[in-house]
Image (tube, helix red, strand yellow):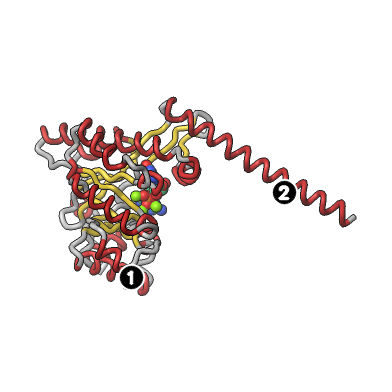
Amino acid sequence: AAKKLGRNRWQFYHDAMNEQTEERLRIEGALRSALERNEFVLHYQPQVDLASGRIVGMEALLRWQHPELGMVPPQRFIGLAEETGLIVPIGAWVLRTACAQAKAWNDMWELCGLAPLRVAVNLSARQFAQPDLVASIAAVLDDTGLPAACLDLELTESLFVDDVAQALDLLHQLKALGVALSIDDFGTGYSSFSSLRTFPIDVLKIDRSFVADIASDADEAAIVVSIIALAHNLKLRVIAEGVESTAQLEFLRAHGCDEMQGYHFSRPVPAEEFGKMIRSGRSLAAELRREPAPEP
Ligand code: C2E
Ligand code: MG
Ligand code: MG
Ligand code: MG
């Protein structure tokens, strides 16, 4: 009986494994053709300046518009795209599309007397390891006509731990193009204070896990206040991610955080909707004025 049970168990794992492998192969094949079939889209989430209340930029976030599965969020496929290396052509598409879109918007808004916005693009470790990364970014800026100062590259802390000398060289080359460099999900990775001192970073993005409880948890609040102070002491801009409530917003404003991004202001939205948001002059200042005064 034990033997039979063992066999069944093995059969069970075996089937589960096959199912997993099949699922992976299926997604991998679908990912491969998704680029050709134009199934990727970018959504844009506004980045809001906390002092002025104005939208000053947007993060481009990838979605997969799958014919059967519908809108697939990046967590479902970015990992596999990274493992298979498909993130390289996909990331190249993201960069080009986001820069072209930002350029088109900025041209339009300039006619309306509005200041140009920055666009933030996420770079994966795999892209970072491509020998032609700097040249390909330069080519995208050149082709689209987006000023380098309007592009913000979001990197994660994991990029800084492997080969420090090489990473440093690459970051300096990227800086020489004139783009801004951000550390995404700051606080969740492995970067040390010395890496912040060493690397030519412009922006820290506080991970939303720290922002979640700032209004209710004194320890979380202390961490966020410390990150803001650290960023400012190092002359970096600081952006809070995942701001979902007025209480979080007020806390961040009171503690001098520069910018925020989060559902409280807007979820990531399709390009058309983002365009409308800008044209309508939507701002945090206007929204706060409309909100009833808090109870004393
Ligand atoms: P991320 O770069 O840290 O992007 C922020 C994520 O937080 C986005 O999830 C965004 O929708 C979500 N978010 C924004 N505000 C809030 C909020 O108030 N509450 C909550 N709960 N979430 C909020 P999304 O779009 O699902 O992207 C997830 C991750 O996938 C990104 O995290 C990024 O690491 C990766 N990703 C997205 N697009 C790309 C891309 O084009 N290339 C690469 N390499 N990675 C990407
Ligand atoms: Mg990001
Ligand atoms: Mg993040
Ligand atoms: Mg992330």
Is residue 63 visible in the rendered image? The answer is: yes
As helix, strand or loop, the secondary structure at mark 2 comes to helix
Rendered location of residue 178, percent (x, y): 18, 46
Whichever of labels 2 and 1 marks the residue nearer the N terminus, that label is 2
Quadrant where the N terminus is found in the figure: bottom right
Q: Is residue 104 above or below residue 16?
A: above
Rendered location of residue 33, percent (x, y): 48, 28
Could you say which is closer to the camera, residue 107 or residue 37? 37
Q: Is residue 192 above or below residue 273?
A: below
| Most distant residue in the right direction | 1
Nearer to us of marks 2 and 1 is 2
Q: Amino acid at mark 1?
A: Ile
Q: Residue at x 35, y 34 (%)?
A: 93
100 with respect to 2 (left or right): left
Q: Is the residue marked 1 within 8 Å of ligand 3, measured from its CB?
A: no
Q: Residues within 10 Å of mark 2 (few under 14, many from 20)?
A: few
Q: Amino acid at mark 2?
A: Tyr
Q: Residues within 10 Å of mark 1 (few under 14, many from 20)?
A: some
Q: How many labels sit on residues?
A: 2
Residue 271, quarter of the rendered image: top left
Residue 223 numbered tag: 1
Q: Which residue is labeled 2 in the image?
A: 13
122 with respect to 139 (left or right): right
Q: Residue at x 41, y 45 (%)?
A: 126
229 with respect to 218 (left or right): left
| Most distant residue in the top direction | 37
Q: Residue at x 77, y 50 (%)?
A: 10
Cα–Cα gap, marks 2 and 1:
43 Å
Is residue 292 visible in the rendered image? The answer is: no
